[in-house]
């Protein structure tokens, strides 16, 4: 079996509040932003602070807080869509900076909102096949660097942050979760619904030009574009069936799940999905008021907070669902 053990996270020091956004965009009141998103503050990386830096800080916090022996780690998985470089692999940079053993595997995975669950699935596969015993999974995003300065929509939703988790072949005395069965869904036909078009090789010589669309929103292919309507429809209609498949693959009924932790996209979308999945409000954990949508880090951040708040105890089952950019969906269950 594969066990999810300790989790920690790190958020940059700089904070962008709703008041700050209101000053730049007076048409968006503080109350309007919070009512639409459920977010009051987001953490923003500095100009010289990147995904590897946030991931490093999260991992060091994990090692120090939980007395993790870094020399027992034999595989590093680094999940990000905002890597320091297209090449080399950021995981290799972090291996050196964390002073991990050199006799380990280190790989980047380019996944967004479902990235943490993909990372768990890779880690479980590595352990099940005997390739690794102790895996460090880091998720780290600096999406705010992709956001245009006058893009008031995406600016309200996204924040930067990183998480670090240990997945092991063995359990320990702390609260650990057995990683159960997964279900996945991919619709690459919607790849352009959440995209930074000029971020890779295909259009790396293209020049980004500011354009204002029919809704008065800024468009520039050098920056993040999100088709909010399409993303909402994808999430609303595709997540519930995958949610049911996760339950079926694990032979459990919805009533047997003690806590549900979904990707923390924004409050409105989360509550809409909760109702469609018929999840009781008191079992649906939300944690994004002061950290916003940190993409692949939202689920581990929320999971860490749920443990701190004593929402998860031994004997509990926790269902995780990630969904969004790709377009992709992934889900699994942790049994504590």
Image (cartoon, grey):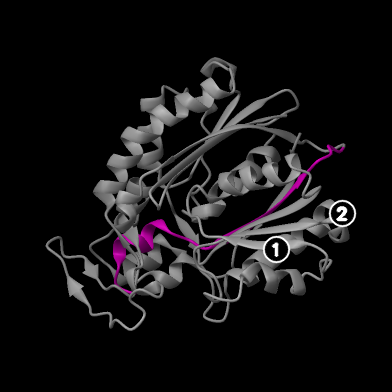
Q: Position of residue 164 (x, y in %)?
A: 69, 55
User: Where is residue 197, by image quadrant?
Assistant: bottom left
Residue identifier under label 2: 67
User: Which residue appears at 84% of the width and 39% of the height?
Assistant: 170
Give the class, few, some or many, for how many residues have Cα within 10 Å of label 2's Cα (few <14, many ≥20).
few
Q: Quadrant of the C terminus?
A: top right
Residue 300 shows in this picture: yes
Magenta residues?
Answer: 149-172
Q: Position of residue 156 (x, y in %)?
A: 37, 59
Q: Position of residue 218 (x, y in %)?
A: 23, 69
Residue 4 shows in this picture: no
Relative to residue 206, is residue 81 drawn left or right? right
Task: Name the mark on residue 106.
Answer: 1
User: Which residue appears at 58% of the width and 17% of the height?
Assistant: 252
Q: Along the polypeptide, which appears first: circle 1 or circle 2?
A: 2
Q: Nearer the viewer, residue 220 or 156?
A: 220
| Mark pair 1, 2: CA separation | 22 Å
């Amino acid at each position: 079996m594969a066990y999810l053990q300790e989790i920690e996270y790190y958020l940059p020091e700089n904070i962008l509040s709703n008041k700050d956004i209101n000053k730049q965009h007076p048409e968006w009141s503080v109350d309007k932003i919070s009512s639409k998103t459920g977010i009051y503050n987001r953490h923003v990386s500095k100009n010289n602070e990147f995904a590897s830096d946030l991931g490093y800080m999260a991992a060091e916090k994990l090692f120090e807080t939980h007395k993790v022996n870094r020399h027992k780690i034999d595989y590093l998985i680094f999940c990000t869509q905002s890597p320091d470089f297209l090449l080399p692999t950021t995981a290799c940079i972090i291996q050196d900076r964390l002073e991990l053993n050199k006799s380990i595997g280190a790989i980047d995975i380019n996944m967004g909102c479902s990235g943490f669950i993909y990372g768990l699935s890779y880690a479980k596969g590595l352990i099940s096949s005997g390739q690794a015993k102790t895996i460090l999974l880091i998720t780290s995003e600096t999406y705010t660097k992709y956001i245009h300065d006058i893009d008031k929509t995406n600016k309200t939703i996204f924040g930067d942050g990183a998480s670090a988790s240990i997945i092991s072949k063995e359990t320990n005395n702390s609260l650990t979760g057995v990683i159960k069965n997964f279900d996945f869904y991919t619709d690459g036909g919607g790849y352009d619904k959440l995209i930074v078009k000029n971020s890779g090789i295909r259009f790396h010589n293209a020049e980004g030009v500011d354009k204002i669309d029919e809704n008065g929103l800024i468009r520039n292919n050098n920056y993040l574009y999100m088709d909010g309507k399409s993303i909402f429809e994808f999430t609303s209609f595709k997540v519930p069936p995958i949610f049911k498949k996760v339950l079926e693959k694990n032979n459990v009924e919805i009533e047997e799940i003690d806590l549900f932790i979904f990707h923390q996209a924004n409050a409105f979308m989360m509550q809409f999905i909760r109702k469609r999945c018929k999840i009781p409000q008191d079992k649906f954990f939300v944690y994004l008021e002061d950290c916003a949508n940190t993409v692949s880090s939202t689920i581990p951040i929320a999971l860490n907070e749920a443990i701190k708040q004593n929402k998860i105890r031994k004997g509990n089952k926790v269902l995780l669902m990630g969904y969004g950019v790709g377009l992709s969906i992934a889900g699994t269950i942790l049994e504590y």
